[in-house]
Amino acid sequence: MTAANFDRITVDPKQMNGQPCIRGMRLSVRRVLEAVPLYPNREDLFREYPELVEDDISQALELAAANLEEVIDFRVA
């Protein structure tokens, strides 16, 4: 994936400490990723964050997946 694939994600060093945000808003990708499991019903999520659209969520999830480099071992010792 390249930056061109993430046309809904913006990074501005002067905004939100340079965190990736949704379309230049003060809504970070991290916050969206945290909100998705809290609002399993998308209608509830969109009510809480009316500025979001489905494509914003999709790109936030894609960005997170593209940046997962570490393999996490969930086996119980």
Image (cartoon, rainbow, N blue to C red):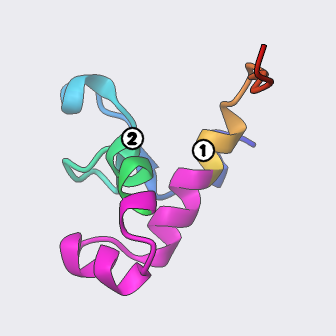
**Pointer 2 local density, CA inside 10 Å: few below 14, some 14–19, many at least 20:** some
Mark 1: amino acid: Leu
Badge 1 is on which residue? 63
| Residue 35: percent from left, percent from top | 35, 57
Residue in the image at 28% along x and 50% along y: 24
Main secondary structure found in the magenta portion: helix
Left or right of 47, for residue 76: right
- Decide whether residue 63 is among the magenta residues: no
Is residue 28 something one can see in this rendering? yes
User: How many discs mark residues in the rendered view?
Assistant: 2
Residue shown at the point (34%, 30%) measured from the top left: 19
Residue for point 58% across, 53% down: 61
Let me know if residue 6 appears in the view: no
Q: Which residue ends up furthest to the top in the rendered image?
A: 77
Please tell me which residue lies in front, 55 or 4. Answer: 55
Q: Secondary structure at mark 1?
A: helix
x, y (%) of residue 33? 44, 50
Measure the C-alpha gap from mark 2 to mark 1.
Answer: 10 Å
Dividing the picture into quarters, in which one does residue 44 lie? Answer: bottom left
User: Label 2 amino acid?
Assistant: Arg
Residue 15: percent from the left, percent from the top?
A: 19, 32
Q: Which range of residues does the magenta coloring cover?
A: 37-61
Across and down, in percent, residue 1 comes to: 75, 43
Secondary structure of the residue carrying numbered label 2: helix
Is 25 positioned to the left or the right of 7 in the image? left
Q: Nearer the viewer, residue 5 or 27?
A: 27
* Residue at figure coordinates x 68%, y 42% from the top left: 65
Query: Mark on residue 30?
Result: 2
In which quadrant will I find the C terminus? top right
The tag earlier along the polypeptide, 2 or 1, is: 2
Q: Residues within 10 Å of mark 1 (few under 14, many from 20)?
A: some
